[in-house]
Image (tube, rainbow, N blue to C red):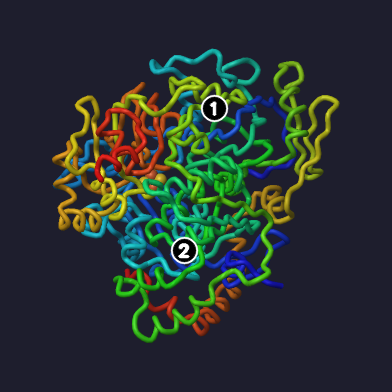
Amino acid sequence: MIPFTKVSGIAAPMPAPNIDTDIIMPKQFLKRIDREGLAIGAFHDLRFDETGAERPEFVLNKIPYRSAKFLICGDNFGCGSSREYAVWGLLQLGIRAIIAPSISGIFFGNCEKNGLLAITVPQADVDPLVAHASLPETSEMQIDLHNQTILASSLCVPFEISDTRKQLLLSGADHIQTTLNATDQIRAFEKKQQSHAPWLWAHLAKG
Amino acid sequence: MSLTLYEKLVRQHTVTQLDDEHVLLYVDFHIMNEYTSPQAFAGLHTADRPVWRPQAHLAVVDHVNPTRPIQSLNDIEDEGGRLQIETLSKNCIRHNIQLFDLFDPRQGIEHIVVPENGFAWPGMVIACGDSHTTTYGAFGALGFGIGTSEIEHVLATQTLVYKTLKPMLVQVDGILPIGVTAKDVVMAFVAKVGAAGASGFAVEFAGSTIAALSVEARMTICNMAVEAGARAAVIAPDQKVFDYLDGRPHAPKGADMVAALGNWQTLQSEPGAQFDKVVHLDATMIEPLVTWGTSPDQSVPVTRTIPNPTNDADHRALDYMGLFAGQSLSGLKIDRAFIGSCTNARIEDLRKAAKILKGHQVCSDVTAIVVPGSKDVRRVAEAEGLDAIFRQAGFEWRGSGCSMCLAMNDDIAMAGERCASSTNRNFEGRQGRGVRTHLMSPEMVAAAAVNGAIVDVRKMMETHQ
Ligand code: SF4
């Protein structure tokens, strides 16, 4: 996982609510067993028309947003299907952070596991960020995870993030290894459950 | 402090508290499908890690398989889908994980075969790489969807780093009017709170309406709660749930069942437990609902007209759907009718839809298919003669799978077509690029198929009487 510390780049405004993962990564890109080649799939049906030609009106096809690193979004971004392909595609397109008033739960978790910074701030803070992003000359922003701030020209928006998430994102640590360091605790839990709720260990799937 | 059911389930599965909002949560049971699991296994292999507890997992093929009869995997034309099915099988063999493969008699949509085979019980934590895992809340289990990295995490550690949710109570009381179903109850809930209204919450459904519903109907409700953003939905288990589980192949038996029952009966929110949000629904006021937009919360009773748009998203949705404010959905012509999905393809759903169809013909302009949720559902339906009713009415009687719920196989509609669908998502392009999906109950889909247009199913029920 790529660590996230301080990142600068263009922010693109996408203020519509309920942008779902079917839109972020349409189904035709889900038929694979690897994570490669998904940049083309990100927002595919918004970026390209039926003939494969770019839709010039779509924000990520415009200058300077073609090279956007951040998306400033509306409520409930990433809702719908659990497909992590959506996050892989965004990262491969160069997106490093999503800022929205609310971000859907599973998508949020998927972001975190891949080092895509997902930030929720109140709508009152999103609005000026959208306004800044909407003007090419003020669309350059900087996100400082250490200090938990989003800088856009003269604007400085603070954000909340739990310590657990922050440390994992800053370090880019292997989540599974971090959990496996607690192997003894997991084993202890299992032992306790086996004595308190033995039926849970008796009838599950047999290999 | 008094605990809600949700809080109890989390507490009983907490391995350790990580910080104020995260716990390391133990996962009792984990389900995988062919399209969100391959990269998880690949990650496991790269890191050379074993599966922590192979018998706590089940894999099911459901998303990409065709629903027309095939003899072998070679008959699947789509290479990507075939590769995913083959890869799942290889991974399950390698790690000794139980698999309901495409040709297994128990195959079907994961959220249908898991309850059917008695894998989901009260008090369990169940995770699956699919957002509709909330379905298992109907049993008083904590079920939730996870992404692929989390699948890998469960495979390797049997746990998840879990962000705890705030409890929300949805109190539904009153007797449901005739022709109004569990699907309408949950659509009414989603419409009332909005597509993000339960974001960050674990919803508990309670009240006399819920108590009166069958276990299958409760699954419909918990299944679709995720469309309001709820990452968990629970219903306190009762005798109906215990009876449902009794005798299912993988449910506890004998002394285990006795011990389990003792525990299951304690699984309720305690008196005085605090909910962060409470929503009331009056079941007697709910009518059959139909979506008009591209988000599941954009619905209206079939008796009403499409509301005025309030924002850009509404305008865009109307534009995509080819509709305008003030228009009545009743009478709107459809091209397709689809009965299927983990929301509404259980045996009770098929019985109810067949009841509407009996003695009627699907309108000649409409292509109608019914995809039973599992091979078991299909067999039971055939034993009851439901397949004959569907076929005689003009529905295609298919094999089981997700099919046109997300159109990842070859069951796909054409751009511009309007589809009456018993599924859970009306997103842009969900059933094919440019396809216009209208969500409704399976009874309403049956009625629409016959009329060639969206119609209030209650009108057809009157003519029946
Ligand atoms: S039926 Fe639809 S919602 Fe259910 S698991 Fe399949 S694709 Fe997902």
Q: How many marks?
A: 2
The residue lying toward the viewer, choosing from A175 and A153, is A153
Q: Residue B211 has which mark?
A: 2
Q: Is residue B128 left or right of residue A134?
A: left
Q: Horizontal and vertical percent for residue B291? A: 45, 34
| Residue B163 against residue B401 in the figure, above or below | below
| Residue B414 against residue B226 in the figure, above or below | above
- Secondary structure found at label 1: loop
Q: Is residue A100 visible?
A: yes
Tell me the subunit letter for badge 1.
B
* Residue at image coords 73%, 49%: A161
Q: What residue type is labelled 1?
A: Pro
Q: In which quarter of the image is residue B161?
A: bottom right
Tell me the subunit letter for badge 2.
B
The residue lying toward the viewer, choosing from B260 and B107, is B260
Q: Distance between the residues labelled 1 and 2?
A: 32 Å
If you read the primary sequence from the N terminus, does the residue marked by circle 1 or circle 2 appear first? 2
- Outermost residue on the right side: it is A154
* Residue at image coords 60%, 23%: B312
Q: Horizontal and vertical percent for residue B336? A: 29, 30
Q: Horizontal and vertical percent for residue A148? A: 79, 43
Query: Pointer 1: what residue?
Result: B307
Q: Are marks 1 and 2 in contact (CB under 8 Å)?
A: no
- Secondary structure found at label 2: helix
